[in-house]
Image (spheres, helix red, strand yellow):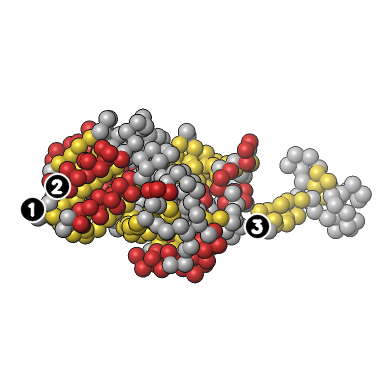
């Protein structure tokens, strides 16, 4: 066989209620290794979480290999044809193979913006060796983005997969073992257990092949966490290098304002006190420059809404979230200040020791007993229930790409943003 260094990307093989592109990628990696090829890196690449035609988590996979690229492509095509849920309207797989890693520009647009199939094919024709599409071929976007991916920040996920004869059966797991696993490995792993809800959040509920997934900062961390878990025996597993938990999807809000389907970080001032609406959703207006943006913490974010409710008009904050239906769906925020709220009230009459009453608009206050007047009110200050710092949604409501506070989040500096939050990414 002709040996070469190559990348193979696959996307859009699953459906809302079954299959999993990472499972197919793991099967492919095992088969290629058995044929004598070397696996250098397995990447799980999350893309723009707001894309409306995604099947579930909008993830593509990329395998970096040394071996026969033509044989790997043929094998991948066969696996996709036999396993992809082609009966699902939204499932439109794509496979891409490249000898050299294409430029990362297309990946950055796919993770934080919106790409077309035509744009993916342009990159493929310019840089790639083989490609194949099924049905509409929308998966070419994710497959191309995966082999173009650049991770200035990265995490790892240990994905355990079920034996195929158990796919239609209920998962057998010991819940307490997931709690113990997170307790013993946090903050080097995260989003294993939801403390408020009292159950694991790393176990799927659908009939897809994933048994559970443990996320962490190193391959060692996730593997150690798995050693504490008690469950049905996995059929196989793969440790994936990933962009999950990195905020790679966020861009600065520039120009005339936010665009539909893009995720932003926006610094501004709370213009109105938050209000709780129908269904328990909490909202407020953020003023940034001359723009007013509706920000929303939806009911599934649970206790996070209490932090949002504690904000007051005038608070300076940095918000992060996706802009959908003219609303910024909050993922987390940083509060720069929590100044006491002034509460003016009528002054005491120094003679009568009774509260004065209003003397009329802009006329100050007057004592009803002795007639003495005061121009200014007495001031009291409401103690705040919130303090400056970061606030985030709970694990059960967190998006795959959102960086958890467990990974460490320094106070933001508007003049020095991380590379994965640079503003030129959509240009």
Mark linked to residue 1: 1
Instruction: Look at mark 2 in the image and give the residue it sits on.
Output: 71
Sequence-first disc among 2 and 3: 2
Q: Residue at x 38, y 38 (%)?
A: 15
Sequence-first disc among 3 and 1: 1
Q: Position of residue 31 (x, y in %)?
A: 23, 52
Sequence-first disc among 2 and 1: 1
Q: Position of residue 154 (x, y in %)?
A: 33, 59
Alpha-carbon distance for marks 2 and 3? Answer: 64 Å
Whether residue 265 is visible: no
Instruction: Look at mark 3 in the image and give the residue it sits on.
Output: 384
- Asked whether the beta carbons under mark 2 and mark 1 sit within 8 Å of each other, the answer is yes
In screen coordinates, is 341 left or right of 326? right
- Asked whether the beta carbons under mark 3 and mark 1 sit within 8 Å of each other, the answer is no
- Assign a secondary structure to mark 2: helix
Image height of 384 relative to 21, above or below: below
Q: Nearer the viewer, mark 2 or mark 3?
A: 2
């Amino acid at each position: 066989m002709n040996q070469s260094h190559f990348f193979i990307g696959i996307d859009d093989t699953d459906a809302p209620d079954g299959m999993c592109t990472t499972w197919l990628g793991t099967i492919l990696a095992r088969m290629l290794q058995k044929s004598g090829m070397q696996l250098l890196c397995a990447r799980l690449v999350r893309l723009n979480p707001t894309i409306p035609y995604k099947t579930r988590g909008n993830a593509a996979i990329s395998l970096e290999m040394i071996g026969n690229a033509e044989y790997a492509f043929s094998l991948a095509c066969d696996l996709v044809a036999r396993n992809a849920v082609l009966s699902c309207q939204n499932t439109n797989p794509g496979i891409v193979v490249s000898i050299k890693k294409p430029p990362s520009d297309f990946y950055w647009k796919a993770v934080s913006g919106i790409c077309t199939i035509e744009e993916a094919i342009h990159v493929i024709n310019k840089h790639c060796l083989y490609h194949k599409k099924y049905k509409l071929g929308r998966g070419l976007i994710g497959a191309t983005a995966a082999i173009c991916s650049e991770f200035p920040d990265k995490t790892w996920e240990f994905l355990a997969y079920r034996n195929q004869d158990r796919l239609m059966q209920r998962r057998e797991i010991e819940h307490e073992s997931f709690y113990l696993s997170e307790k013993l490995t946090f903050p080097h792993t995260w989003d294993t257990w939801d403390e408020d809800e009292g159950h694991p959040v790393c176990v799927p509920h659908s009939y897809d092949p994933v048994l559970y997934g443990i996320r962490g900062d190193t391959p060692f961390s996730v593997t150690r966490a798995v050693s504490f878990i008690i469950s049905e025996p996995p059929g196989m597993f793969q440790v994936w290098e990933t962009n999950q938990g990195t905020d790679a999807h966020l861009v600065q809000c520039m120009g005339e304002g936010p665009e539909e389907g893009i995720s932003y970080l926006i610094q501004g001032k709370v213009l109105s006190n938050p209000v709780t609406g129908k269904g328990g959703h909490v909202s407020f207006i953020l003023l940034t420059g001359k723009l007013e943006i509706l920000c929303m913490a939806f009911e599934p974010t649970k206790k996070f809404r209490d932090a949002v409710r504690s904000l007051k008009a005038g608070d300076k904050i940095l918000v992060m979230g996706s802009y959908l239906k003219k609303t910024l769906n909050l993922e987390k925020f940083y509060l720069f200040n929590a100044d006491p709220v002034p509460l003016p009230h009528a002054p005491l009459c120094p003679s009568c020791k009774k509260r004065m009453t209003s003397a009329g608009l802009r006329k100050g206050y007057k004592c009803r007993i002795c007639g003495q007047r005061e121009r200014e009110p007495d001031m009291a200050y409401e103690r705040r229930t919130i303090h400056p710092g970061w606030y985030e949604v709970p694990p059960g409501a967190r998006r795959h790409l959102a960086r958890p506070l467990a990974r460490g989040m320094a106070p933001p500096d508007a003049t020095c943003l991380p590379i994965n939050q640079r503003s030129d990414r959509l240009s």
